[in-house]
Image (spheres, helix red, strand yellow):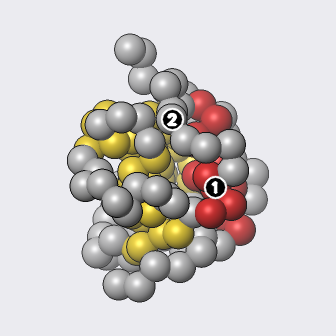
Amino acid sequence: MAHRKPNERETHLIRTLADAAHGLRADANWIEQLLVEPLADGGMGSLRLHLHGCAERDQKFGRVGSELMFKDVDGVDVIATLYLDEIGAPFELDVWKVTYAPLIQIPEVLPLAHSPTV
């Protein structure tokens, strides 16, 4: 799939998760330069994150950066997780709707994200 700029709600979700991620390593303006690539997840909204400068190296999954849970407009729980690569750079946004149905909409107001205990 082609890379694209994240939409406003995707950006807000990624920023909320990034703000809570312990040990995140990225330039100050990384989110403005971010490109995303939708993942084949049945329409739940997961995105591969492409940062300027990371294309030159082969990123590998490192750890969970942070996560939060919200309800989709149909009342179904959704868990959003920001994964970091092996050096702490943003790597992937995983969105999982507990019914495996497609995500309808990321809410405008998100709950606080939390970082797993290290």
The label shown at residue 81 is none
Residue 14: percent from the left, percent from the top?
A: 58, 52
Marks 2/1 in contact by CB < 8 Å: the verdict is no
In the image, what residue occupies the spot 53% across and 79% down?
A: 4
- Residue 35 versus residue 105: which sits nearer the camera? 35
Residue 25: percent from the left, percent from the top?
A: 51, 35
Please state if 15 lies on the left or on the right of 93 as rendered.
right
Name the kind of residue labelled 2 in the image.
Answer: Arg
Among numbered discs 2 and 1, the one appearing first in the sequence: 2
Q: Residues within 10 Å of mark 2 (few under 14, many from 20)?
A: some
Is residue 9 among what the camera can see? yes
Is residue 74 among what the camera can see? no
Quadrant holding the N terminus:
bottom left
The residue furthest right is: 109
User: What residue does disc 1 label?
Assistant: 31
Please state if 34 lies on the left or on the right of 55 as rendered.
right
User: What residue does disc 2 label?
Assistant: 25
In the image, what residue occupies the spot 44% across and 42% down?
A: 89
Please state if 114 lies on the left or on the right of 88 as rendered.
right
Q: Residues within 10 Å of mark 1 (few under 14, many from 20)?
A: many
Residue 62: percent from the left, percent from the top?
A: 28, 37
- Residue 2 versus residue 111: which sits nearer the camera? 2
Looking at the rendered structure, the secondary structure element under dot 1 is helix
In the image, what residue occupies the spot 24% across and 47% down?
A: 60
Name the kind of residue labelled 1 in the image.
Answer: Ile
Quadrant holding the C terminus:
top left
